[in-house]
Amino acid sequence: MKYLDEYRTPWIARHILTEINNNVTRPWVIMEVCGGQTHAILKHGIDQLLPNKIELVHGPGCPVCVTPLELLDKAIAIAARPEVTFCSYGDMLRVPGSDHDLFKVKSTGGDLRIIYSPLEAVKIAREHPDRQVVFFAVGFETTAPGNGMTILQAEKEGLHNFSVLSSHVLVPPAIRALLSLPDNRVQGYLAPGHVCTVMGWQDYEAIARRFKVPIVPTGFEPMDILEGILMVVKQLEQGRYEVQNQYRRSVKREGNIPAQEIINTVFEVADRNWRGIGPIPASGLRIRQKFADFDAERKFPVSSIYPREPEICISGQVLQGLKKPKECTAFGKECTPEHPLGATMVSNEGACAAYYKYNMARVGRI
Ligand code: SF4
């Protein structure tokens, strides 16, 4: 397949693996931040090919997984309101809230629509002026420009029956928080290539210097990930701690300036609670006061919700790279993709779902 096969070529993979083997002399722990990278690693068996001295741990880069439970409970409460048409991407529907999920709202008569583009929600608001249309905007910096555009478009058209329930989180503050943990084991990072395509990598330079960790913005194909690991390993072995760009075909140091301008127009940086991790200062985007009429959290009375997490779920430790999914006693037993207990088993990008899909398949359990 054009533009894809060249990033999956076996002889190049063998060459990079030989380079990694030739360079590594000591044990190193490397975190890939993005859930898409986690899935690629497990799907292509990269974790099995690496020398034993390299341990890959999986980070919090699945936006569905880190959407705080209280916000999910708010989404469920808003979606259940009779005047509301609730628009969401499909992967949020099965994420368990304190009592139930958005699918339950739909199955009990809620007007819940699965959309594939943010502007679809604006279109629904335009076509149904008698309904309050709410768009559940979940994601990292990657989706913030597109989601922010819905508010700009709704304002331009005077659609006051449209609002956004915003759950946007930022990667650099999360990396900083993980590196500050007393039990942090991570020595190098593969940064998410798509986030860096939007935001650039300037924010990572101070983190690399402060914590003495190599950070490599990396793509999502097997060759990308192997080359990213090689770049991290070479820096670690040579005692260098820099930001080095693997995803050269997409990422520039300054990022995508027009996309950043949309983000800065609509959103402002705010403290944010991450599911399983807890509050991280200045790690989220909230809708600016100027656009308060389009902010579902201000529009609907949902401020006093007190969520409950299932006690058995260790997804918080999984998201922090402290444990692997298979260390959870519920993995593959009480918790499966069909009956998920935690968000990391629901989402396509969740680490528990990746281990279930690829590791269980390897041993013939599914
Ligand atoms: S396997 Fe299920 S219960 Fe265990 S950490 Fe993952 S999501 Fe939570």
Image (cartoon, rainbow, N blue to C red):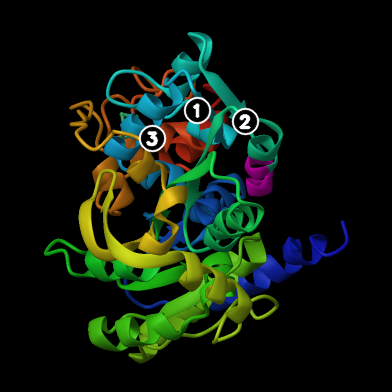
Q: Residue at x 27, y 33 (%)?
A: 328
Prevailing secondary structure class for the magenta stretch in the rendered image: helix
Mark 1 or mark 2, whichever is nearer to me: 2
The response on whether ligand 1 sits within 8 Å of label 3 is: yes
Q: Which residue is mark 1?
A: 93
Question: First in sequence: mark 1 or mark 3?
Answer: 1
Q: Which residues are magenta?
A: 117-122
SS category of the residue bearing label 2: strand
Query: Who's the residue at 64% across and 58% down the image?
Result: 156
Task: In the rendered structure, find residue 118 and report the number of the disc placed on it.
Answer: none
Badge 2 density bin: few <14, some 14–19, many ≥20, Cα 10 Å: some
The kind of residue tagged 1 is: Leu
Residue bearing the label numbered 2: 114
Residue 343, label in figure: 3
Q: Left or right: where does residue 125 sit relative to residue 24?
A: right
Determine the CA span between mark 1 and mark 2: 9 Å
Where does residue 25 sit, x and y in percent of width and height?
37, 78
Verify whether residue 121 appears in magenta: yes
Circle 1 sits in a helix, a strand or a loop, which is it?
A: loop
Ranked by sequence position, the earlier of labels 2 and 3 is 2
SS for callout 3: helix
Q: Position of residue 243 (x, y in %)?
A: 44, 85
Q: Amino acid at mark 3?
A: Ala
Question: Label 2 sits on what residue type?
Answer: Ile
